């Protein structure tokens, strides 16, 4: 995976201007801190994934960015300005916070028309957007109460894109989409970012974010726990190694100064790279059944740790 | 024209690489900042939003429908000497006085109850501008509805007189008509006030019925039983004070009483509600 060095990623990230800047954002409700000193940036030409378990503070942070929720402290700017200072925000920032938050009695076409008229766009934009998100004209005439969640997400994406914005802020846009829909969304956002757009999207699913994001912001219990390019976060993962003789392998690795930890049912994980682990195992005469670079394993562990507190299944991690 | 060029990528990039961007991403030239959303556009959109749902459409249509039904009822059921413009006005006025506040309530509360506010207030991130537009549009609809109602009543009056063979009786002065329109606009503002204060459709509608049908009864009861309240009632009972508008008997004192009662029951709670709308969280 090291074809793209983290160094290069860093450099390119620095070159691209920050389109969304969140600084020391906090939000507390009587005795409960939903967002705690959150800072991050999202850059042009990149998809920034906002990852965290349910209730971690993703949606609250995004609502603060677009001015729907007042922050207790801290600032958030989009395109260098507070959201409320954008003169016609729909034409600069496309926002989808909750696809179900629409008047159930309006048709899909009507919802797009309202957005089109609010921004004073050409009427043809409505049909363009319906085509873009593959909602047929029959579907567009149906009332939103009869839409599946996937159709609502498509309509929400259409509403976000209708003003041809250069920044997209999407909260859990893949929810309710079928696998083909998720693939479609991924391609759409990739194309959008490659054309110079900025995407900030949230998800509570690690895999979903992993396949689309360039940069990751991981949030748990209202705090940022990791922040960086995906390459950086994945590179820090080390090695996963498996053997029938776990005890012997553990001893050998520890003797070599590594500190292996148990991982995923009988395997071990260390921060060292696979070639070193292989050499150690060979020298110790321990037969390996699996040896691989632990792409994302560190991230996954961190994420499981975050979720385990809130998961009803108990100690999943 | 769209900058959103959707490329269908041939293959799904493996999870271990960062997509297919290997060069510097296209950095777009800085774009011109669009002009501020004009108020005329917000007004037009808010007007459209009042008609574009089935409930909104039928609520508005029901004003015309009930006006026609009430007119027909007067012609059919009223004794011949009662077929006067005043009675047509009264018959039409009752359903309209209930319907208009509902329209005002729903125009505000649907943004919260239906959660469309998430979109509305991100497309126009100034809630005061949106609420103001809703207020203007509501009052406009109220005035137009009243004019339609008066026109329907006038037709009914002509028709009624033709059927009974009596002379046409025009017993509402232009000033009195103005008072009635004002009274209905005030009723609509009460609905609007409850909308911004409660921000929930069901709650605000229940609130409206308590406000207009339970409170006046309690006020009457109190006035009948407590001497100290009897004189005070004229000054603090908004419903009572509006009675003079409907009767067309507006003296200087009646205006003053309308003012003080309106301050207590409309202006102050409206100000509180607007403050809440501007500061509350939209979820």
Image (tube, rainbow, N blue to C red):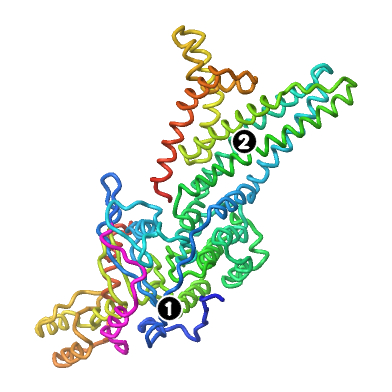
Residue A223 is situated, as x and y percent measured from the top left of the image, at 26, 61
For the point 60% across and 28% down, the residue is B183
Q: Residue A108 falls in which quadrant of the image? A: bottom right
Q: Is residue B208 toward the left or the right of residue A234 in the image?
A: right
Q: Compared with residue A221, is residue B190 higher up or lower down, i.e. above or below?
A: above
Q: Quadrant of the N terminus of chain A?
A: bottom left
Crowd rating for badge 1 (residues with CA inside 10 Å; few <14, some 14–19, many 20+): few
Residue B270 is situated, as x and y percent measured from the top left of the image, at 46, 35
Q: Is residue B161 toward the left or the right of residue A83 in the image?
A: right
Q: Residue A262 falls in which quadrant of the image? A: bottom left
Task: Give the camera-side residue of A301 and B82.
Answer: B82
Residue B78 visible in rendering:
yes
Q: Quadrant of the C terminus of chain A?
A: bottom left
**A313 inside magenta stretch:** no
**A5 inside magenta stretch:** yes
Q: Secondary structure at mark 1?
A: loop
Residue position for label 1: B29
Q: Which mark is residue B100?
A: 2
Q: Which residues are magenta?
A: A1-25
Residue B202 is situated, as x and y percent measured from the top left of the image, at 53, 38
Residue B199 is situated, as x and y percent measured from the top left of the image, at 47, 41
Tag 1, which chain? Answer: B
Residues at marks 1 and 2, CA–CA distance in whole angstroms: 50 Å
Which of discs 1 and 2 lies nearer the camera? The answer is 1
For the point 70% across and 35% down, the residue is B147
Q: Is residue A311 toward the left or the right of residue A96 in the image?
A: left
């Amino acid at each position: 995976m090291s074809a793209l060095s983290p160094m290069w990623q860093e450099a390119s990230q620095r070159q691209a201007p920050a389109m969304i800047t969140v600084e020391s954002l906090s939000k507390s409700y009587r005795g409960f801190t939903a967002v705690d000193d959150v800072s991050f940036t999202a850059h042009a030409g990149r998809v920034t994934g906002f990852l965290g378990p349910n209730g971690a503070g993703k949606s609250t942070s995004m609502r603060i960015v677009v001015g729907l929720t007042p922050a207790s402290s801290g600032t958030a700017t989009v395109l260098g300005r507070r959201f409320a200072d954008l003169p016609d925000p729909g034409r600069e920032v496309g926002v989808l916070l909750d696809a179900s938050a629409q008047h159930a009695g309006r048709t899909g076409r009507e919802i797009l028309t309202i957005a089109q008229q609010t921004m004073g766009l050409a009427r043809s934009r409505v049909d363009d957007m319906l085509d873009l998100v593959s909602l047929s004209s029959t579907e567009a005439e149906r009332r939103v109460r009869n839409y599946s969640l996937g159709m609502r997400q498509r309509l929400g994406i259409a509403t976000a894109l209708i003003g041809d914005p250069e920044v997209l802020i999407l909260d859990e846009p893949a929810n309710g989409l079928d696998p083909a829909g998720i693939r479609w969304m991924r391609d759409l956002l990739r194309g959008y970012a490659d054309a110079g757009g900025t995407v900030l999207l949230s998800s509570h699913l690690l895999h979903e974010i992993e396949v689309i994001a360039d940069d990751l912001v991981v949030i748990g219990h209202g705090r940022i726990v990791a922040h960086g390019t995906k390459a950086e976060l994945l590179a820090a993962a080390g090695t996963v190694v498996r053997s029938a003789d776990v005890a012997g392998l553990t001893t050998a690795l520890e003797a070599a100064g590594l500190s292996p930890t148990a991982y995923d049912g009988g395997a071990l994980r260390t921060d060292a790279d696979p070639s070193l682990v292989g050499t150690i195992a060979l020298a110790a005469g321990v037969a390996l059944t699996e040896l691989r670079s632990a792409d994302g394993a560190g991230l996954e562990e961190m994420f499981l740790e975050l979720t385990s507190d809130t998961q009803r299944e108990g100690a999943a991690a | 024209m769209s900058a959103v060029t959707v490329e269908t990528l041939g293959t799904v990039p493996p999870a271990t690489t960062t997509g297919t961007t290997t060069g510097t991403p296209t950095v777009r030239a800085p774009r011109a900042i669009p002009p501020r959303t004009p108020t005329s556009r917000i007004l037009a959109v808010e007007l459209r939003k009042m008609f574009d749902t089935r409930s909104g459409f039928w609520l508005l249509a029901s004003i015309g429908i009930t006006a026609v039904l009430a007119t027909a009822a007067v012609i059919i059921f009223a004794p011949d000497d009662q077929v006067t413009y005043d009675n047509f006005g009264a018959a039409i006025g009752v359903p309209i006085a209930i319907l208009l506040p509902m329209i005002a309530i729903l125009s505000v509360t649907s943004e919260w109850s239906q959660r469309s506010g998430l979109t509305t207030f991100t497309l126009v991130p100034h809630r005061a501008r949106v609420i103001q537009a809703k207020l203007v549009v509501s009052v406009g609809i109220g005035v137009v509805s009243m004019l339609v109602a008066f026109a329907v009543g006038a037709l009914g009056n002509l028709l009624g007189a033709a059927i009974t063979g009596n002379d046409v009786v025009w017993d509402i002065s232009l000033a009195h008509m103005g008072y009635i329109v004002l009274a209905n606009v005030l009723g609509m503002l009460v609905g609007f006030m409850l909308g911004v204060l409660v921000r929930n459709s069901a709650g605000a509608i229940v609130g409206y019925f308590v406000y207009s049908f339970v409170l006046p009864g309690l006020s009457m009861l109190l006035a009948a039983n407590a001497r100290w309240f009897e004189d005070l009632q004229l000054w603090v009972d908004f419903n009572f004070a509006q009675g003079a508008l409907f009767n067309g008997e507006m003296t200087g004192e009646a205006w003053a009483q309308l003012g003080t009662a309106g301050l207590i029951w409309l202006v102050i709670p409206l100000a509180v509600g607007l403050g809440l709308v501007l500061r509350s969280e939209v979820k």
